[in-house]
Amino acid sequence: MFSESDFEIYRHAWRYALAPHCEPQLNDSQCKALLKKGGWMVRNTFDFDCKEETNFWYIIKDSFGGMEELSSNERRKIHKSESAFEYKIIDKQIVREKGYPIIKATFKDYEVKDRPMSEKIFNDYLNYCDDNRFDFWGIYNIDNQELVGFCTVHVWDKSCEYGITAIWPKYLHNATYPYYGLYYKMNEYYLDNQKFKYVTDSARSITEHSNIQPFLEQNFKFRKAYCKLKIKYKWWFGIAVRVLLPFRKLIWNRNVRAVLNMHEYQSH
């Protein structure tokens, strides 16, 4: 069932704001109705977790096997992480007060640079994160109770999406493995304790500024839930995309290349 209120604009693109398995396939008139309200394009994903292998997917985990499903190396890193850090749901105000320096350092540490997040964009994002729809996980150094990282989680009915994850880079290079403990604890909480149908780390990355999705597949048994992708452009933006498409490998701007990559991921 289509409802305009179920879609929101992110970086000039309309995207579905609810759980991905609920997203309907849109027709041209529905896309045009959204574009009349703003934005440059509509990204529509549908047929979530279809049997066909497509060029687009969500990274999901829909079962929790505890330590038993993990390798001895992964278990060792989780135990190491749990001895160094405490993981718990915290108040959004803590993230607002202490989170920006952490996320600024995280973006700076990415091997592939993404568009940096300004403090205003960060605070606007937190304003968008309604307390009734989002959880905020904090990572605390057990020794001094310093907040060393956080993760935002968009919660729906029996499913959720892991959002922004930021950790002080110095803790990523001292063999304490904060990512391992964080994802293990969140998977345990949502899949085992809350009995969610699945958790997701969002759709296929089109900027590839982070290695988190391959990390989750390789270490925590996440998998690809294939889906169909269709994009509807405003007329002038569609012309620009098609003109630039043959030259996408020569374009240095990461955001432009991301749009051209997504165009190629569409189902035909």
Image (cartoon, helix red, strand yellow):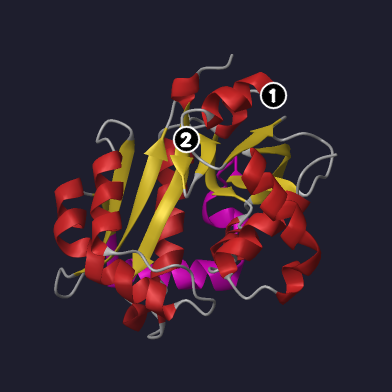
Residue at the disc numbered 2: 38
Q: Is residue 141 visible?
A: no
Give the secondary structure at mark 2.
Answer: loop
Residue at the disc numbered 1: 28
Amino acid on which the number 2 mark rests in the picture:
Gly
Instruction: Give above or below for 14 relative to 214.
Output: above
Amino acid on which the number 1 mark rests in the picture:
Asp
The furthest residue to the top: 1
Q: Give me the disc on residue 237.
A: none
Q: Which of marks 1 and 2 is nearer the N terminus?
A: 1
Q: Which span is picked out in magenta?
A: 61-86
Residue 253 sits inside the magenta stretch: no
Dominant secondary-structure state across the stretch colored magenta: helix
* Residue 215 sits in quarter: bottom right
The furthest residue to the bottom: 174
Closer to us: 57 or 62: 57
Residue displayed at 73% across by 76% down:
250
Which part of the image, by quadrant, shows the C terminus?
top right
Q: Where is residue 100 in the image (x, y as percent from the top left)?
A: 24, 65
